[in-house]
Amino acid sequence: MGLAWSRWVEVLLVTALCLALLADAAEWHKFRKCDELAFCERHREAGRRAADGEYARRRGGDGSGSFQLGNITRWHVLRGAPPEVDRDGRWLRFVVAGGSERASQNGTAGSVRLEVAVAAATETIFAVRALRAYSVAEHAPRRWLWRREAPPPAEEDRFRPTDDVVRLAEPPLPLRRRGTDGDPACAVVDGDAESTWITVNDRAAQLPSYPMLRIQHQPFRIELYAQGMRVARAQRGQLTPHAVVNARDLWYMHPLDANDTASASVAADVLFPRAQCALGLPQHTLNLRLPNTHNTTPIRLYNLDVFEYELEKELGLYGSIPMVMAFGGSNDTVGALWMPASETYVDVRPVDPSGRDRGVHVHFYSEHGVPELFLFAGPHPQAVARQLAQLTGPPAMPPLFALGYHQSRWNYLDESDVRQVNAQLDAHDIPCDVLWLDIEHTDAKKYFTWDVRKFPHPDRLQRELATRSGRQLVTIVDPHIKSEPGYSVHEAARRHGWYVKQADGVTDYDGHCWPGRSHYIDFADAAVRQAWASRFTPEHYPFMTEHLHIWVDMNEPSVFSGPEGTMPKDARHVRGRWAHGQLHNIYGHYMQRATFQGLKQGRHGRQRPFVLSRSFFTGTQRYGAVWTGDNRADWAHLRVTVPMLLSMGVGGLSFVGADVGGFFGDPSPELLVRWYQVAAFQPFFRAHAHLDTKRREPWLFGEPYTAAIRAAIEERYALLPYWYTLLATEGGVPPMRPLAYEFPDDAEVTAAQSSWMVGAALLVAPVMQEAPSLHLVDLPGDASVLWYALGERASRLHAGVVAVHRGGDQVEYAAPGLQQTFTYQRGGTVVARRERRRKSAAAAVNDPYTLHVALDARGGARGRLYIDDGRSYAYRQGAYWLVELQTEAPEDQTAAAVWLCGRRTDPGLVTDATAFDGAPATLERIVVYAPCGQRAVLKRPNVTSLAQPHWQVRVALPCRI
């Protein structure tokens, strides 16, 4: 009997395992592939045929000597129709013509014409847009007549997200002609500084050292030159362009069946002849360097709720940014941003598969949209990042508390549970700034409500957390609204027409999510967004205080009963005007935007909002933080956080993070410690877990694990001044950045994703393997670059020996200990820290600063410190301090010393030294790392306040520079 029973148990276990595997397979099977979609398969096949035929003859295909892709159709600027500057003098318009692909295949002398416009959005950003397409072809051969033809939709019937995404303060640069009005071969240049050129000139012209967009007539293509040159040399093919927008698939709108979405599809080919590789296209689980997709699967950009996502997959995840950075070092890096918000696929292919020659081809194709492309002239990675931020808006400046540690799970059960977690954080000396409540805090999954049995006094709880520990509270709000009579949000939405409609454009769309039967807010409608924003007040959200912040989740949108777990593409938005398929990828962005505006309005613009979103699109950085969704508690998911977050940074998202410990599953104590050590050096720092996981708060694992987690969190808090300064002053360059952003000419680092930079000063190379016997750290740069190994806090605040390494070194660490984190400060940098242990960022506002000065080989170092009130928008009116820090050699060259100087460069509107913190911005100590391998510490330097207009301090060193 016992044996039989054990066999039954065995059978049941095996059956359960098989069912689990089948369930996982079914999860992935439900997502559509390119070969199941007419528009994708058609565009991809066209691209492959052209590329296969042309890559072998990369130069001289048309006698011009320029790089180009193959033309299925020979496009040309229409003769007799010279380019024209539009009435406002901003856009250059012209008509291109070419035979259609179908006509070419069938010997028909037909053609398609496109109206194309280009503009200089700024001196380094160019816009290219196809205005409309129309056919002048003869009737198709009889064998095609059985197909019911569908002309592509007009531009006014295409959703265009550009007006919502682009945030340029000024319109495109004014243009004027050079040459006679009747000369089609004219140059159009910036009318003021002549700093940006758009040329359609076939003859020689002198060009100063500025970016240029060149339009070639026949065959038609658009070339970007990121650096100035003689136009004559470019026209003779003696110079290779940085990007080529080719004619082969330039927004070709294929007229297929009337019921086939390919009739509205758009595409663009961009060749980057000087690129070594391509980065970007978030969100996916691929490596930082995008793979060659030619013989595999194109990268999909379609926002989906993906359960326990697999790794190294081209499948789209929760957000999409069709941004590619074509990496070519410090002089040849450019970028391209594709604008449609519909389902999009991207093929990436090296020009030379062997890797011997440079060149990357990127092929965008989208199911719907207005074909619009922005080109960024770089010419180095940080310049491209700043240009993207200039176009789409800088990242929102977060409140200071948001950069601290966030403690969350699904779910803290009630007020008593929250208070217990808060008390344990304090009892174990673990800094924390925010506690989180998931969906179980609501009344039956109805957002903007509380389960008053579990949370009878949520306003009192919020104030208690803030006053006793300096902590904030976050609650979740999702886009699906429970269909329940009497529920105030539902009743208002039905009454005022806030819901997405079904395909008929009249009936409210319903699907299933956490509450059961639900309707979805139409965030694409500006009026609905404003109505949603108005809900974030105590009148509509009971018990809401200034200490409550918002998390928007499931906003891809997730629909449990929908195709691929999302909303059907034929649902209608904005009172029936737009099909959901046209704007799917921007839906979550709109929700975060409306929520951000609601918090801002509800607090009368006095407080910076904090909003976390799972879904995103181009420009989402303006509205808060984003995280990587439902990851898993394993080592592979820990490692993939690095390329995922770095790729999101390439797309312009600066404030990003991943669930510490993994959302699904139970991490081992070692994995959890290592995850904290990694996440402490990533922008958004939150521990979160699924409802079915074991509790994993930092104090539950005992020693030595709790001590190691505490040390990682304390390191994050010590560096808050540095993180805050980076977000305030870097102009869109992400604080967490690839090594290649700082060392673009080091060929060895472009693929690095086991280490990264935090700003320009800190290199992070943590342990991300289980119990390694050896940990290797490759240091970037050449031998002139110094790297100082930063030890534990207890040692680095005292004079002593410090390990110094040089760029190009590989450093080996045998059997690294649990508390070792492997962080290095780059020679030539100054990093501001606050080294005193506190409960929260709010508790440290009166603390003095410690400046860590890492000297380069010549004794130089530079840095900066940004200070404001950490809460409001007063900094926009100049209410901040910006202190530039720099070392200077002493007059006596034989002296073993260095001068550290500070100079304020802010507008000088705040003169009260206690204006922000209630205490002067005092200096507690200066720590200097010298090239000789010694660390000097000067305590209590004679500086009244870092906010003095000028100050300097002499620091004695144990050795001469």
Image: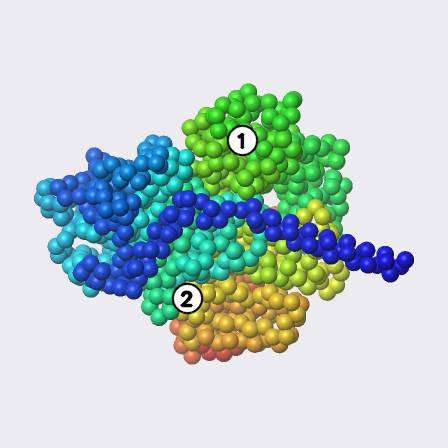
Q: Position of residue 126 (x, y in %)?
A: 29, 48
Tell which residue pokes out farthest to the top in this image. 495
Residue 217 appears in view: yes
Q: Give the image quarter of residue 849.
A: bottom right
Query: Relative to residue 589, is residue 310 depicted above or below?
Result: below
Q: Residue at x 60, y 75 (%)?
A: 774
The foreground one among 705 and 904 is 705
Q: Position of residue 738 (x, y in %)?
A: 46, 61
The foreground one among 416 and 135 is 135
- Mark 2 residue type: Phe
Q: Residue at x 45, y 49 (%)?
A: 35
Q: Residue at x 40, y 54 (%)?
A: 347
Q: Position of residue 245 (x, y in %)?
A: 29, 52
Disc 1 target residue: 521
Q: Residue at x 51, y 46 (%)?
A: 32
Q: Position of residue 162 (x, y in %)?
A: 37, 39
Instruction: For mark 1, give the secondary structure.
Output: loop
Query: Relative to residue 564, is residue 866 depicted above or below?
Result: below
Disc 2 target residue: 743
Mark 2, other Cα within 10 Å: few <14 / some 14–19 / many ≥20: some
